[in-house]
Image: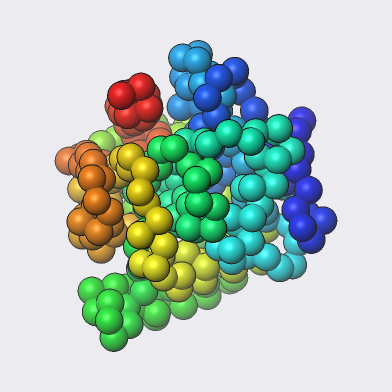
Amino acid sequence: MPYATAKDGTKLFYKDWGVGKPVVLMHGWPVNADSFDETALALAENGYRAICPDRRGFGRSDQPWGGYDYDTFADDIGLVLHAAGVSQPVAIAGFSMGGGDVARFISRNPGRVSHAILIGSVVPFLLQIADNPNGAPKDVFDSMVAAISADKAEFFRRFLCDYFGVGWAAPVSEGAIDNAWRQAMLGGLKPVVACVRAFSETDFRPDLPAFTMPTLIIHGVADRTVPIDLTSRVAAKAIPGAKLVEYEDGAHGLFASHTGRLTGDILDFLGG
């Protein structure tokens, strides 16, 4: 299995499927690169090279004590690409927390990205502060951290029902929920908690001017985990020329509930 080595020595696992133009797929919280398997397979079968890292602390990557900030995450992506021998511009997609990876990688690496894709993304900013009054109060994330720290396994049992919109959005199988829970449990407690702080408190608004490439934004209208009005609709207005595609019956976990449509939209965007 391929691994890259981060600046602090952390071993970063990544999948490398197919031959062709590189497409980086950055997973969300609390899952790992397995969440993109169907899309990665379709990309590889359609002439692309799908590169799917496990974020530090998750999946098969190491679980170091530190480095759970978006500057480090962006640098980790660069080192994965270096290890994979990729020097040309890449397309990069990020789901949920991974949308922040896309934003920060673009702003820190001018010219390295040909196409950007945000899926159910946390961009541009989740936290409620004076100049972001519609954001979520810090108490919401404090409560998440407390619940995870008390019983991580039980927290994710409950959390994933909302994540997939059980009872109000497009349905997913019990197996899909179990698979997401399995992925969540592979994340270390320290990384899982640290990443709640990272994705909730990082302001990506200063990164948005770097989105000068074709940009596709996909989000579920029924998403209660990362509400579309707070995130993707705001990002679409701020990024010139961005294409916003809304899935009316989509909750958060679009990779499982709308696998075929999501993959088709990505392929159409890259091919166009």
Q: Is residue 208 above or below residue 256?
A: below
Instruction: Kindly identify the residue that appears in the image at 77 percent across and 58 percent down.
Output: 7
In the current view of this chain or complex, which residue is farthest to the left?
A: 248
Instruction: Kindly identify the residue that appears in the image at 55 percent across and 63 percent down.
Output: 70
Instruction: Kindly identify the residue that appears in the image at 40 percent across and 34 percent down.
Output: 256
Q: Is residue 6 above or below residue 258?
A: below
Estimate the x, y position of residue 219 in percent, counting from the top left: 28, 45
Q: Quarter of the image containing the C terminus?
A: top left
> Would residue 129 be found to the left or right of residue 57 on screen?
left
Q: Is residue 60 above or below residue 21?
A: below
Evaluate whether residue 151 shows in this view: no
> Would residue 144 be found to the left or right of residue 239 on screen?
right
Estimate the x, y position of residue 82 in percent, counting from the top left: 70, 40
> Would residue 199 be found to the left or right of residue 205 on screen?
right
In front here: 155 or 28?
A: 28
Evaluate whether residue 138 shows in this view: yes
Estimate the x, y position of residue 17 in percent, counting from the top left: 61, 23
* Image quadrant in which you'd find residue 133: bottom left
In front here: 97 or 70?
A: 70
- Callout count: 0
* Image quadrant in which you'd find residue 257: top left
Q: Quarter of the image containing the N terminus?
A: top right
> Would residue 226 be found to the left or right of residue 151 on screen?
left
In front here: 23 or 52?
A: 23
In the current view of this chain or complex, which residue is farthest to the bottom?
A: 130
Q: Is residue 49 above or below residue 185?
A: above
